Image (spheres, helix red, strand yellow):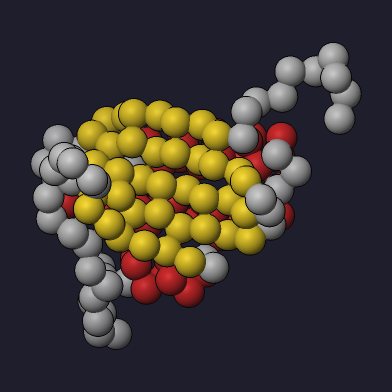
Amino acid sequence: MNKDIAYPPPQYHLTLTAMSPHAARHLRRLLRVFLATWDMPHLSEPAELAMTELLANVIRHVPDRTCTALLLAEQGKLRVEVGDTWPGLPAKAAAGPWDEQGRGLALVELITDAWVVEQTPGRPGKRVWFELKA
């Protein structure tokens, strides 16, 4: 690495209100830039798809659509977290062949190396995160 160039730190944290599906597009662009800078551009497709699914859950199920996003690169892996203050926990659904919804978390499970839904300690809400090995 060139010492004269200021590289972004290995994490990025953002609080946003996802008022429309366009919010996911903007966050995907940020993710792509950080992955390129962190020397992980090959993770772009699965990371963008999984993150979009998590944001879709916020848009669909969280009344105020406010959430936090954390992008973290460490020890050969990428971790993406999406959190909100809504108490309901998402669950993997068993979508039928004609169902238009219910496949998001199954897709996240399929394309990531690990994923978890957990209550936010000490306050209402939850965090859904996934990891991809670099």
Q: Which residue lies furthest to the right in this view?
A: 2
Answer with left or right where residue 87 lies relative to residue 134: left
* 80 is higher (above) or lower (below) than 11: below
The structure residue drawn at horizontal position 35% and vertical position 45%, both measured from the top left corner, is 82
* Residue 90 place in picture, x, y as percent: 22, 62
In the image, 51 versus 127, the foreground residue is: 127
Which of the pair 59/8 is nearer the observer?
8
For residue 104, side relative to residue 38 (left or right): left
Residue at 80 percent across and 18 percent down: it is 5
| Quadrant hosting residue 34 | top right
Q: Residue at x 30, y 60 (%)?
A: 117
Residue 94 location in percent, x, y? Answer: 24, 81
List the single residue furthest toward the top: 4
Most extreme residue toward the bottom is 97
Q: Is residue 117 left or right of residue 80?
A: left
Residue at point 58%, 59% (across, down):
132
> Where does the image place residue 109, in percent across and percent down from the top left?
43, 71
Exactly how many numbered labels are in the figure?
0
Q: Provide residue 54's location: percent of width, then percent of height.
A: 35, 53
Q: Can residue 123 be seen in this view?
A: yes
Q: From the image, which quarter does the N terminus lie in?
A: top right
Quick check: can you spot residue 44? no
Quadrant, the C terminus = bottom right
